[in-house]
Image (tube, rainbow, N blue to C red):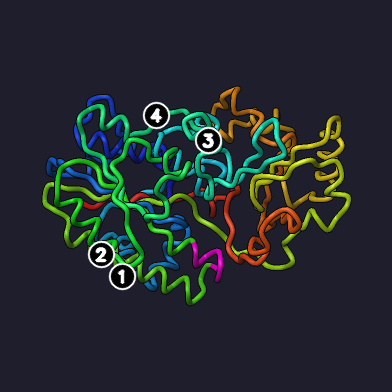
């Protein structure tokens, strides 16, 4: 497990489209070179939270992943997700092939410009309208225009959400209920007809957040994920390929590494709206307060975070090219935690956020590096 990343999460669906013969799809990940037979159907499965650097620990509870790491099955390569390394941003980067500065889903939560409102993307329905908040076309739409079927097997509760539309717009949705056999649903879709079949698995990320990476619950989730992937590999038709990837990695945060901006008046002074997430904070400041806020945070979090003005953060290129219409969604001050630090906002966010053990969202390699595993 070494070497530079081959590409990014943005490259996964274009590679799948290239496997399916879409003429304008560019395979930057050289997936087509590793598939000996011509295929007419491709499954892409995203395992939430399955970071590249977590694979060796996961392997203890995951026989298929252990075989992949040993080089016995599949083809394993390292990719990077987009920044911030958070699920809403990553899912839309996967779906559109674009970076967050281009598609506008620049964090777990964002301030709606011109208001005091903070939009939490996982609870977003239809305000603001998804086509306005995220205007880019998706690869599901591109495939449909090319006459290639594109299906997404997703939890029924995802249906109709703004995030689902932003990431998977154009897909034919196949709702899955908790009592359904999700692996079998994916297998059935793959066998039913040519085209792309997309699946998403949340178990591992949920266990990491609530119980911590490396916990017994996390290893139990790893075993469930591995069993599902094993079922897919075993049932893979001869004319099909399976691409498995992730949206981010993660790390555990101990109590002493937690900073609460709502219990330190020096940190809360001059702030109008707090958005982002604990590893990447967007601070929208009162008029004229941005410079003082940045100076205060830089001093108090020295060695724990990088603190930028909006212009400085954009200039680093970390978000990719930023559409001018999306600029105001980024805070006047951007705080990117380093090490294992997080910045909580206990008076502004649900109490369960402060109780989490595993976190992600930042720019550390443990958060940004993700795998691509190709079977076929």
CA gap between label 3 and label 2 equals 32 Å
Residue under circle 4? 137
CA gap between label 4 and label 3 equals 14 Å
Looking at the image, tell me whether mark 4 or mark 1 is earlier in sequence order: 1
How crowded pointer 2 is (Cα within 10 Å; few <14, some 14-19, many 20+) is rated as: some
- Kindly report the secondary structure that dominates the magenta region of the rendered protein: helix
Q: Nearer the viewer, mark 4 or mark 2?
A: 4
Residue under circle 1? 63
Residue 333 versus residue 32: which sits nearer the camera? 333
CA gap between label 3 and label 1 equals 34 Å
Please report contact status of discs 3 and 1: CB closer than 8 Å, yes or no.
no
Q: In which quarter of the image is residue 251?
A: bottom right
Check disc 3 and report its element: helix, strand or loop: helix
CA gap between label 4 and label 2 equals 32 Å
Residue at the spot 22% in from the left edge and 45% down from the top edge: 42
User: Label for residue 100?
Assistant: 3
Image quarter of the N terminus:
bottom left
CA gap between label 4 and label 1 equals 38 Å
Please report contact status of discs 2 and 1: CB closer than 8 Å, yes or no.
yes
Looking at the image, tell me whether mark 3 or mark 1 is earlier in sequence order: 1
Residue 216 versus residue 32: which sits nearer the camera? 216
Residue under circle 2? 230
Up/down of 181 relative to 93, above or below:
below
Magenta region: 206-212
């Amino acid at each position: 497990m070494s070497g530079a990343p081959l590409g990014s999460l943005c490259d996964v669906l274009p590679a799948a489209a290239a496997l399916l013969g879409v003429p304008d799809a560019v395979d930057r990940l050289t997936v087509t070179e590793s598939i000996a037979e011509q295929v007419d159907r491709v499954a892409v499965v995203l395992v939430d939270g399955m970071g590249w650097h977590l694979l060796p620990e996961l392997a203890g509870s995951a026989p298929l992943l252990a075989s992949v790491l040993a080089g016995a099955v599949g083809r394993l390569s390292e990719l990077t997700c987009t920044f911030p390394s958070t699920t809403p941003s990553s899912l839309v980067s996967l779906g559109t092939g674009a970076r967050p500065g281009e598609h506008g889903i620049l964090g777990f939560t964002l301030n709606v410009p011109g208001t005091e409102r903070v939009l939490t993307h996982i609870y977003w329905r239809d305000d603001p309208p998804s086509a306005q908040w995220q205007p880019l076309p998706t690869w599901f739409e591109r495939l449909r225009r090319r006459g290639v079927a594109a299906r997404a097997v997703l939890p029924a509760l995802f249906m109709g959400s703004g995030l689902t539309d932003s990431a998977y717009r154009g897909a034919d949705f196949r709702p899955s209920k908790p009592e359904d056999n999700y692996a079998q649903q994916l297998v059935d879709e793959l066998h039913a007809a040519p085209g792309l079949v997309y699946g998403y698995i949340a178990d591992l990320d949920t266990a990491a957040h609530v119980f911590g990476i490396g916990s017994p619950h996390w290893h139990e989730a790893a075993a469930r994920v591995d069993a599902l992937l094993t079922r897919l590999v075993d049932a893979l038709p001869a004319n099909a390929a399976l691409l498995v990837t992730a949206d981010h990695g993660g790390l555990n945060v101990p109590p002493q590494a937690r900073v609460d901006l709502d219990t330190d008046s020096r940190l809360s002074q001059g702030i109008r709206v707090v958005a982002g997430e604990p590893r990447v904070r967007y601070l929208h400041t009162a008029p004229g307060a941005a410079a003082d806020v940045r100076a205060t945070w830089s001093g108090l979090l020295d060695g724990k975070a990088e603190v930028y003005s909006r212009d400085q953060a954009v200039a680093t290129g970390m978000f990719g090219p930023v559409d001018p219409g999306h600029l105001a969604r980024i805070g006047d001050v951007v705080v990117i935690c380093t090490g294992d630090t997080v910045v909580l906002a206990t008076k502004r966010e649900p109490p369960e956020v402060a109780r989490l053990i595993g976190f992600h969202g930042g720019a550390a390699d443990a958060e940004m590096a993700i795998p691509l595993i190709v079977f076929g």
